[in-house]
Image (cartoon, rainbow, N blue to C red):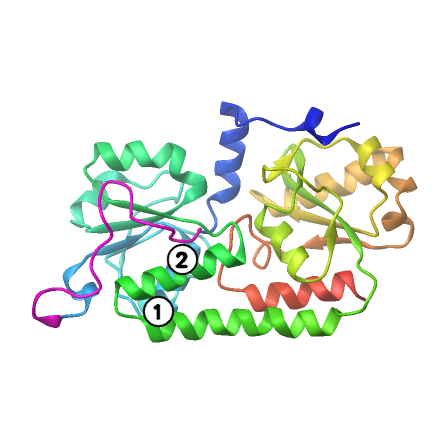
């Protein structure tokens, strides 16, 4: 059976699912913001750009990175997750997927940071509101690093951006040396949301982390981030390791996975199940798009792939 026969198109229902998954974090800046050119690195009189620009961050991950770059914000997302202390008292603009545009507009922003996985829905909303949106791409570490460097250059934070990216690259190199010469484990990554689950390909952020940690995704040659699940085909691939990522409502999804693995008899035939190589990924380390905890996530992945 070919994977193409199971591929999910970006239908309205699947897009809604993707947006649900992406609300927790952010992606990297790869070009000019929607609706206009990127703001200059410095303005008249040589003042730092952030003194002339009013930045709103609408995702947790973007807010983490602006904090690391020591940037001021006039708006931050509403989230149950802990946000950097730097932004205590800053106006909250609502959920990443549906920011309150009246609040955003009232802040008179010159740039609003969101993520590429939300661009389909939010780009027209921002445009209609006359707001300059910059959709960041954090779907891989490489793209995320580029985004960090782009923001650093734009706001005179090159030193902070380079230090952050150099740290991530050093961690990747450390892991490469650590796993060099060892048998490469094959890996199945399941992405669960309440009521269903998908298979994550090498083009997903978690798939990218697994690759950098030395694992080989059993799904190769696809162009999308996620595919529909076909347990019979997956069992034929017989991965060494199964990673289960729970998003949306993590506790509920973990219970869903446990019920599925007990109820569906086919799972007991997987070597990963027989060898107790099934791991539930903590959402704070393994979101659907990149976040600040890259080093911690890579260390955790290595321990699962090379126990």
At a point 16% along the width and 46% down the height, the residue shown is 106
Name the residue tied to disc 1: 69
Please determine whether, in this image, residue 212 is positioned above or below residue 262: below
**Which of the pair 157/290 is nearer the observer?**
157
In the image, is residue 211 part of the stretch drawn in magenta?
A: no
In x, y percent, where is residue 34? 28, 42
Name the residue tied to disc 2: 147
**Structural crowding at the residue carrying mark 1, measured as other residues with C-alpha within 10 Å and reported as few (<14), some (14–19) or many (≥20):** many
On the rendered image, what quadrant is the C terminus found in?
Answer: bottom right
In x, y percent, where is residue 134? 31, 48
- SS of the residue under disc 2: helix
Magenta segment range? 27-46
**Which of the pair 196/218 is nearer the observer?**
218
In the image, is residue 39 part of the stretch drawn in magenta?
A: yes
Q: Point out which mark residue 119 bears.
A: none
- SS of the residue under disc 1: loop
Please determine whether, in this image, residue 154 is positioned above or below residue 234: below
């Amino acid at each position: 059976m070919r994977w193409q026969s199971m591929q999910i198109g970006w239908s309205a229902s699947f897009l809604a699912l993707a947006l649900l998954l992406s609300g927790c974090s952010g992606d990297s800046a790869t070009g000019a913001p929607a609706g206009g050119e990127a703001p200059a690195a410095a303005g008249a009189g040589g003042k730092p750009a952030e003194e002339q620009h009013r930045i709103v961050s609408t995702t947790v991950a973007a807010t983490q990175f602006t904090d690391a770059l020591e940037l001021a914000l006039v708006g931050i997302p509403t989230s149950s997750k802990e946000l950097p202390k730097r932004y205590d008292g800053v106006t909250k603009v609502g959920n990443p997927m549906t920011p309150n545009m009246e609040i955003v507009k009232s802040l008179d922003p010159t740039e609003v940071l969101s993520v590429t996985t939300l661009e389909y829905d939010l780009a027209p909303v921002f445009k209609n509101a006359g707001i300059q949106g910059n959709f960041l791409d954090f779907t891989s570490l490489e793209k995320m690093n580029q985004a960090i460097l782009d923001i650093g250059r734009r706001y005179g934070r090159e030193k902070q951006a380079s230090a952050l990216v150099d740290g991530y690259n050093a961690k990747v190199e450390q892991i490469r040396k650590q796993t060099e010469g060892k048998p490469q484990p094959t890996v199945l990554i399941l992405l669960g949301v309440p009521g269903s689950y998908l298979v994550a390909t090498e083009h997903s952020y978690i798939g990218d982390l697994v690759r950098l940690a030395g694992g080989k995704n059993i799904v190769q040659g696809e162009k999308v981030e996620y595919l529909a699940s076909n347990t019979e085909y997956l069992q034929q691939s017989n991965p060494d390791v199964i990673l289960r990522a729970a998003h949306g409502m993590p506790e509920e999804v973990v219970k869903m996975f446990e019920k599925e693995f007990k109820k569906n008899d086919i799972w007991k035939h997987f070597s990963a199940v027989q060898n107790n190589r099934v791991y539930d990924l903590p959402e704070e380390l393994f979101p659907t798009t990149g976040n600040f905890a890259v080093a911690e996530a890579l260390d955790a992945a290595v321990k699962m792939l090379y126990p």
